């Protein structure tokens, strides 16, 4: 089959081109034609330890020879270990294991609504923020405050409302109009253009939620698991959530998501309220333990902060050099560079030159390399990116 015919096999949900990718090693991916790509997209922030990391490969072999699946009517050692690691390294409570980020957000919305309805049957409204992205299933889609994702799929789930990101005054006005069950926010938005929440805004949300018995949910699906140089992005602010959702890198490349809830919310959920067939399968959890043990090392987190600072310096150097580079945003190894030109041709040219990057909103290109990235890798990526900029300015 010719490369151009591959997409005829699939529903048209992604724009894909070129020969299939067949293997990966460290920072690189290789396609069927033998071309290699420096991976600064990381499967949309999934492969935190890079490709074919020895610890991951070893655990795949070990757990793969033991047990791949049992239903959640039972429990497995890797589930127990993963839950313990998640709780030890966050704010505690209880864990629900699922398969993906959108599933994690669906669970968080359901848990918050059931908890809130103990107060009032009208207390079911959910607030999210401009440029957020929480997933593509209906609850998560409804929480995503971007109309382009809703188009053609209306009506969205009732009870969802949107406020401007980082705008305390407008947010308070909306909060005062309804009985809210939850506020959901990404401490560092990814898809929406790599936008950081301010300390003042997060402090306001925490205080308002406490006063009005509203669950504060942090979506750390893209910005969590070490990506910003702390285990969780919220730890930079010292402001804990009531619920946190995570996925992407958690399973080491195997689908895995999780919801962490404080006890008061977790205790209202009873058997039958929610569930999953594959969530928390033994293989994914075993790999999750490997990833968590690695990224929670102080030396590893320091390396991420140092690499992020170096990458930020390189990108800001391009901003100073080229007037059509308007800003550099983000934290750690989740950085975005905003252009005054269409970023799509730049991303495509980077791919031609051997660098994989991912677009975001507002003419932004995301740099999300594996957390093992070196300065040499960053130098190589910056050189390719600069060449692509010059070819497309």
Image (cartoon, rainbow, N blue to C red):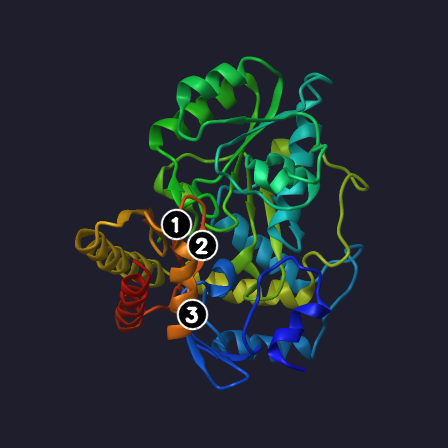
Dot 2 alpha-carbon crowd within 10 angstroms: few under 14, some 14 to 19, many 20 or more: many
Query: Disc number at residue 359?
Result: 2
Tell me what residue is drawn at x 57 percent, y 21 percent: 213
Which of the two discs, 1 and 2, labels the residue nearer the N terminus?
A: 2
Q: Is residue 253 left or right of residue 157?
A: left
Residue underneath mark 1: 364
Quadrant position of the N terminus in the picture = bottom right
The one nearer the camera, 92 or 114, is: 114
* x then y, percent, for residue 77: 66, 63
Between the residue at mark 3 and the residue at mark 2, the CA separation in whole angstroms equals: 12 Å
Name the residue furthest bottom: 34
Dot 1 alpha-carbon crowd within 10 angstroms: few under 14, some 14 to 19, many 20 or more: many
Q: Is residue 229 left or right of residue 316?
A: right
Count the numbered circles shown. 3
Q: Please, is residue 39 above or below residue 278 in the view?
A: below
Between the residue at mark 3 and the residue at mark 1, the CA separation in whole angstroms equals: 16 Å
The one nearer the camera, 379 or 321, is: 321
Task: Look at the numbered disc 3 and give the secondary structure of its residue.
Answer: helix
Q: Is residue 256 left or right of residue 45?
A: right
Q: Please, is residue 275 above or below residue 286 in the view?
A: above
Task: Look at the numbered disc 1 and give the secondary structure of its residue.
Answer: strand
State yes or no: discs 1 and 2 in contact (Cβ < 8 Å).
yes
Which of the two discs, 3 and 1, labels the residue nearer the N terminus?
A: 3
Residue underneath mark 3: 351
Quadrant position of the C terminus in the picture = bottom left
Q: Please, is residue 148 above or below residue 257 in the view?
A: above
Dot 3 alpha-carbon crowd within 10 angstroms: few under 14, some 14 to 19, many 20 or more: some
* x then y, percent, for residue 313: 22, 56
Between the residue at mark 1 and the residue at mark 2, the CA separation in whole angstroms equals: 6 Å
State yes or no: discs 3 and 1 in contact (Cβ < 8 Å).
no
State yes or no: discs 3 and 2 in contact (Cβ < 8 Å).
no
């Amino acid at each position: 089959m010719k490369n151009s015919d591959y997409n005829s096999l699939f529903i048209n949900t992604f724009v894909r081109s070129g020969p299939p990718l067949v293997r990966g090693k460290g920072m690189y991916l290789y396609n069927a034609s033998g071309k290699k790509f420096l991976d600064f997209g990381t499967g949309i922030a999934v492969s935190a330890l890079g490709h074919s990391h020895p610890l991951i490969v070893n655990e795949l072999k070990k757990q793969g020879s033991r047990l791949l699946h049992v239903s959640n009517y039972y429990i497995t050692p890797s589930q127990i270990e993963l839950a313990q690691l998640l709780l030890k390294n966050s704010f505690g409570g209880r864990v629900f294991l699922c398969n993906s980020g959108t599933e994690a957000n669906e669970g968080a919305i359901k848990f918050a609504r059931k908890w809130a309805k103990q107060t009032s049957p009208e207390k079911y409204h959910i607030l999210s923020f401009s440029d957020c992205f929480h997933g593509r299933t209906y609850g998560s889609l409804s929480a995503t405050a971007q109309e382009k994702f809703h188009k053609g799929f209306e009506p969205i789930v009732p009870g969802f409302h949107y406020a401007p990101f980082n705008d305390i005054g407008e947010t308070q006005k909306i909060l005062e109009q309804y009985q809210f069950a939850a506020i959901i926010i990404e401490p560092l938005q990814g898809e929406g253009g790599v936008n950081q929440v301010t300390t003042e805004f997060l402090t306001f949300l925490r205080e308002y939620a406490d006063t009005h018995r509203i669950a504060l949910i942090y979506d750390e699906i893209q910005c969590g698991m070490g990506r910003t140089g702390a285990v969780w992005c919220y730890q930079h602010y010292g402001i804990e959530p009531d619920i946190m959702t995570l996925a992407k890198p958690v399973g080491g490349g195997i689908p895995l998501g999780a919801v962490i809830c404080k006890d008061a919310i977790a205790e209202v959920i009873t058997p039958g309220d929610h569930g999953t067939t594959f969530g928390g399968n033994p293989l994914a959890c075993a790999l999750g333990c490997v990833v968590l043990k690695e990224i929670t090392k102080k030396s590893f987190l320091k390396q991420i902060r140092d690499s992020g600072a170096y990458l930020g310096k390189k990108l800001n150097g391009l901003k100073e050099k080229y007037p059509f580079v308007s800003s550099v945003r983000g934290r750690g190894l989740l950085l975005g560079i905003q252009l005054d030109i269409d970023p799509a041709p730049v991303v495509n040219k980077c791919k031609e030159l051997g660098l994989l990057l991912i677009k975001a909103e507002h003419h932004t290109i995301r740099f999300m390399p594996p957390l093992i990235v070196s300065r040499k890798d960053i130098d190589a990526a910056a050189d390719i990116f600069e060449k692509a900029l010059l070819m497309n300015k």
